[in-house]
Amino acid sequence: MSAEKTKDDRKKVSLNKETCKTLNAFSRLNAVKLRLVIDSMVDIVLSDEYLSSRVIALASEKENMEKE
């Protein structure tokens, strides 16, 4: 796959600074690129209904906390 094709398949995503630092540290610790870690996490969450519901519940809680 060409480098140009690979770059066309990517999109920038906004993250909290602390979340970004945590994910970067995790990916470096395991010697894997950050985008591959995030891609894999998404695949796992989408394939596991229980995990998916936990992620949505936590995201809703965090959203409510931000509104207060």
Image (tube, rainbow, N blue to C red):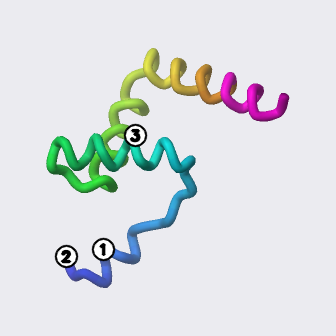
Q: Exactly how many numbered labels are in the figure?
A: 3
| Earlier sequence position, callout 2 versus callout 3 | 2
Mark 2 vs mark 3: in front: 3
Q: Quadrant of residue 64?
A: top right
Q: Residue at x 82, y 33 (%)?
A: 67
**Residue at the spot of label 2:** 1
Question: Which secondary structure lies at badge 1?
Answer: helix
Q: Residues within 10 Å of mark 3 (few under 14, many from 20)?
A: few
Mark 1 residue type: Thr
Per the image, the residue denoted by label 3 is 42
First in sequence: mark 2 or mark 1?
2
Residue 44, position as x, y percentages in the image:
34, 32
Residue at x-position 31% and y-position 79%: 5
Q: Residue furthest top?
A: 50
Q: Are marks 2 and 1 in contact (CB under 8 Å)?
A: yes
CA distance for labels 2 and 1: 7 Å
Task: State the separation of the CA atoms marked 2 and 3.
Answer: 22 Å
Relative vertical location of residue 53 with respect to residue 29 in this rendering, above or below:
above
The spot of residue 48 in percent (x, y) is 39, 23
Q: Residue 62 lies in magenta, yes or no?
A: yes
Where is residue 6 shown, x and y percent of the image? Answer: 30, 74
State the quadrant of the N terminus.
bottom left
Q: Earlier in the sequence, mark 3 or mark 1?
A: 1
Crowding around mark 1 (Cα neighbors within 10 Å: few <14, some 14 to 19, many 20+) is few
Q: As shown in the figure, which amino acid type bears the numbered disc 3?
A: Val
* Amino acid type, mark 2: Met
Q: Which residue is mark 1?
A: 6
- Which range of residues does the magenta coloring cover? 61-68
User: Secondary structure beneath disc 3?
Assistant: helix
Quadrant occupied by the C terminus: top right
